[in-house]
Amino acid sequence: MLDFLNPLGLVAKYAIIGAISVLIGNFIASQLGMNVAMNYPVAAISGAVGGAIGGWMRQRKGKTN
């Protein structure tokens, strides 16, 4: 999945995926009329941090992609 991000490394790849997915989820929630109190830059940073932690944990298990 998203093989063009592989040269960046597993941690960076998961950080980018996390940031984008949180932004998409935040946008969809706001379009559905849910009261989203988090702004987009904070959401992107938190998604990137969570994704980086997930990528780091996956890398520690010996996964390559």
Image: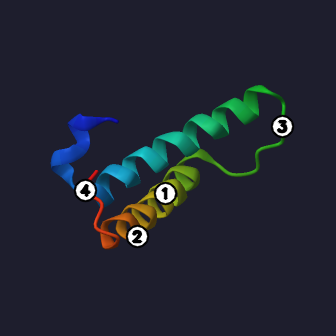
Kindly identify the residue that appears in the image at 28 percent across and 67 percent down.
Answer: 62
Q: Left or right: 32 with respect to 56?
A: right
Residue drawn at 35 percent across, 70 percent down: 61
Which secondary structure lies at badge 3?
loop
Kind of residue at disc 2: Met
Q: CA distance from mark 1 to mark 2?
A: 18 Å
- Residue 54 shown left or right of residue 29 in the figure: left
Residue 41, image x, y percentages:
53, 50
The residue at 76%/44% (across/down) is 36
Q: Quadrant of residue 55?
A: bottom left
- Alpha-carbon neighbours of circle 3 within 10 Å: few (<14), some, or many (≥20)? few
Type of residue at label 1?
Ile
Residue type at mark 4: give it: Thr
Reading the image, the residue beneath label 2 is 57
3 and 1 marks in contact (CB < 8 Å)? no
Quarter of the image with the N terminus in it: top left
Residue occupying the far top of the picture:
31
The residue that mark 4 highlights is 64
Q: Which label belongs to residue 45?
A: 1
Query: Which label lies toward us, 3 or 4?
Result: 4
Q: CB of mark 1 within 8 Å of CB of mark 2?
A: no
Residue 34 is labelled as 3
Residue at image point 50% right, 62% down: 50
